[in-house]
Image (spheres, rainbow, N blue to C red):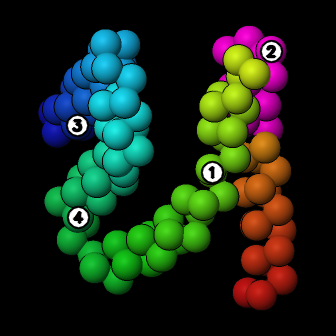
Amino acid sequence: MVFFLRLILAAVIIASVSEISGRWPRIGALLLSLPLTSILAFSFSWQAHGDLKSMSAMARETLILVPLTLPFFVPLAFAEQWHMGFWTAVAVGLLATSVMILGWFAISQNFN
């Protein structure tokens, strides 16, 4: 039951941000830039497990990984100027982000 409540809450937030961004792109961008997924995931994880050591480790890893996901937004931000369609820009952004993350994991394995 708790899982479905979490699922509904996450869906409502995503749908709300989508609706808001259609009317007010700047407010939508602000909401998208907030770490809503992280806030929900940390809260749900804390409620389920209450393990501060695990939460701290997850926060440290998130702190490292967030900058590596920023290349996703570059093709979307310049799609119009670069004459890219929406899905092409999404695909290029996902590819760029995947390369960054896979590169990080490959490099970081050498230090463990």
Displayed quadrant of residue 13 = top left
Residue under circle 1? 69
Labels 4, 2: front one: 2
Q: Quadrant of residue 11?
A: top left
Q: CA distance from mark 2 to mark 3?
A: 39 Å
Give the residue type that dot 3 points to. Arg
For the C terminus, give its image quadrant: bottom right
33 vs 39, left or right, is right
Q: Nearer the viewer, residue 27 or 5?
A: 27
Query: Looking at the picture, which amino acid does disc 2 mark?
Result: His
Q: Earlier in the sequence, mark 4 or mark 1?
A: 4
- Disc 2 designates what residue? 83
Q: For the residue labelled by badge 3, is the local secondary structure a helix, a strand or a loop?
A: helix
How packed is label 3: few (under 14 Cα within 10 Å), some, or many (20 or more)? some
Query: Marks 4/3: CA distance?
Result: 13 Å
x, y (%) of residue 10?
28, 32
Q: Where residue 51 appears, x then y in whole percent?
A: 27, 76
Read off the residue under disc 3: 6
Query: Which numbered disc, 2 or 3, marks the residue that appears first in the sequence?
Result: 3
Q: Which residue is under mark 4?
A: 46
